Amino acid sequence: GPAGQPRELCSILCDNLMVTRGKDGGRDSQGVWDGHGHTAVESGMDMDTRLCLPWRTSKDLLDRKILKKKRYMHMTTVTSAHFFFFFACFPGKWHLGLNCASANDHCHHPLNHGFDYFYGMPFSMMADCERWGLSEKRAVLERRLGICSQLVALAALTLTIGKLTHLIPASWTPVIWSTVMCLLLFSTSCVVGTLIAHADCFLMRNHSITEQPMRSQRTMPLMLHEVSSFLKRNKQGPFLLFMSFLHVHTPLVTTENFRGRSPHGLYGDNTEEMDWMVGQILDTLDTEGLTNSTLVYFTSDHGGSLEAQSGNNQYGGWNGIYKGGKGMGGWEGGIRVPGIFRWPGVLPAGRVVHEPTSLMDVFPTVVQLAGGQVPQDRVVDGRDLLALLRGTAPHSDHEFLMHYCESFLHAARWHQRDRGAVWKVHFATPVFQPDGAGACYGQVVCPCSGDGVTQHAPPLLFDLSRDPSEAHALTPDTEPSFHRVVETVARAVAAHRRTLSPVPLQLDAADNTWKPWLQPCCGRFPFCWCDRDADPR
């Protein structure tokens, strides 16, 4: 391609990984970011304040855009005329829906949103995919089925007693049917975990199911095999490879070779395995002669999941000095994630950028790299990172960044460049449970609204440049600029809100209710079983 433009783009996204500051002020990830992780940092550049901002942010990069808020989505359209041609491959976890009206319409499939090839999980990584895990979905279903079976059993018992005492003049038919229904509900509650594993945990290649249910110990080798095969087939380029890891999301599926290797438990083992997998991808790029022409970008969607527990043990991650975690709209522990770029000969190796950036910046940056133009008929929240990455711009183009939880604005950030300060204003924060805890234990994630959230008037103010842990809220008595900062951020929030337009919720209770007629199945439902991939190990 033209000078300064890569012929290949490789984006690597992991799940629930927080890179933190160690005790000496350096960066680590619970002591597990080792091996190829350090190699990637040393041969590339590190963005110290990369932020996951889940509002109006893009997850796929071509054709029709899916713009995703955390649990809040809407659609718009970007035509491929904005880009040079890239063959786009998506291996990994999609988690943006599949069907709309039938079990095979695949309206939300990656191939209907700009990608040319897909291999992976169309849904999310559920705890039930690893048979010992218990997912929220399974817990809710078992509880509901248990309540229903008890109510039906009570009805059957009442009818039986009424019939035997001649208090209820009815036939035995209602008694028989209610007893059968009770037994059916009870039996279903006993096998609901297996049903969920068949329903949610499967692999697809393009539009065909290849393994249902998936065998988790084979999944990592299969993913690596797909990436390696793609790179070898398409090394003449240009291409876009978007690797979306199942790591390090609970239930932390880890192959036997990596179990017990980390001193930090299963989360550490899973992180080390992912680190090795990143190394395998980089090695393949080297072997195929693609290193110097490929921009590699590694990041995570958000921080560790503090509420994820196995028994009494927290196993969903650790966010170091940063408060909060996954699903929390404003606290740094949920939104500060690693950002590592590698492009030998173009990006200076070993450089650390201490500017606030966003995952939303991926879209305009890739469009620019591909020789295209960002659409001008809509608000694009991301900013092109090329000048910042190359060192020709001293600051990020983001002066203000907004932090949402669902559709609720919880916090906003102001980068005051003339002072070198980064201010964070919290309008609402989740109520941690129990009192004094650092997360919403007993829940899957913290709530975004209602009684589980504290509204702050005046808002909480922190200076992240001096207090990255958000441990000491500033007041007018302790910070002379308090009122100026809060008023400046309030004006930015008002200007931001004028650019928004309402969209229908796609992830409300009705849309998230399981619909059997939309269930993908490689057999005749509910007998969904197939294995069409050879074990690559």
Image (cartoon, grey):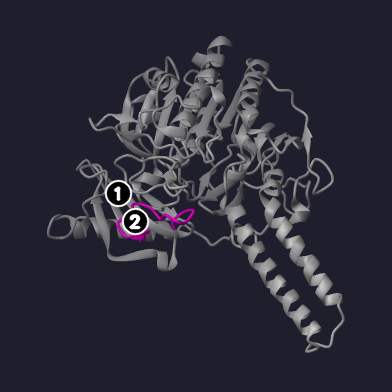
| Image side of residue 165 versus residue 448, left or right | right
- Residue 87 disc label: none
Q: Quadrant of the N terminus?
A: top right
> In this orientation, which residue lies closer to the viewer: 89 or 502?
89
Residue 447 visible in the displayed image: yes
Q: Tell me which residue sits at (83%, 88%) in the image.
A: 169
Number of residue marks = 2
The residue drawn where x is 57% and y is 48% is: 134
Q: Main secondary structure of the magenta part?
A: loop
Compared with 227, 181 (above or below) is: below
Residue 356, how many percent across, how many down?
A: 34, 40
- The Cα atoms of the two marked residues, 2 and 1, are separated by 9 Å
Q: Please say if the residues under marks 2 and 1 sit with CB atoms less than 8 Å apart.
A: yes
Query: Does 496 appear above or below 366?
Result: below
Give residue 23's position: percent from left, percent from top: 24, 33
Where 338 sits versus 328, above or below?
A: above
**Marks 2 and 1, the one that precedes in the sequence:** 1
- What amino acid does circle 2 point to? Ala
Stretch of the chain drawn in magenta: 428-446
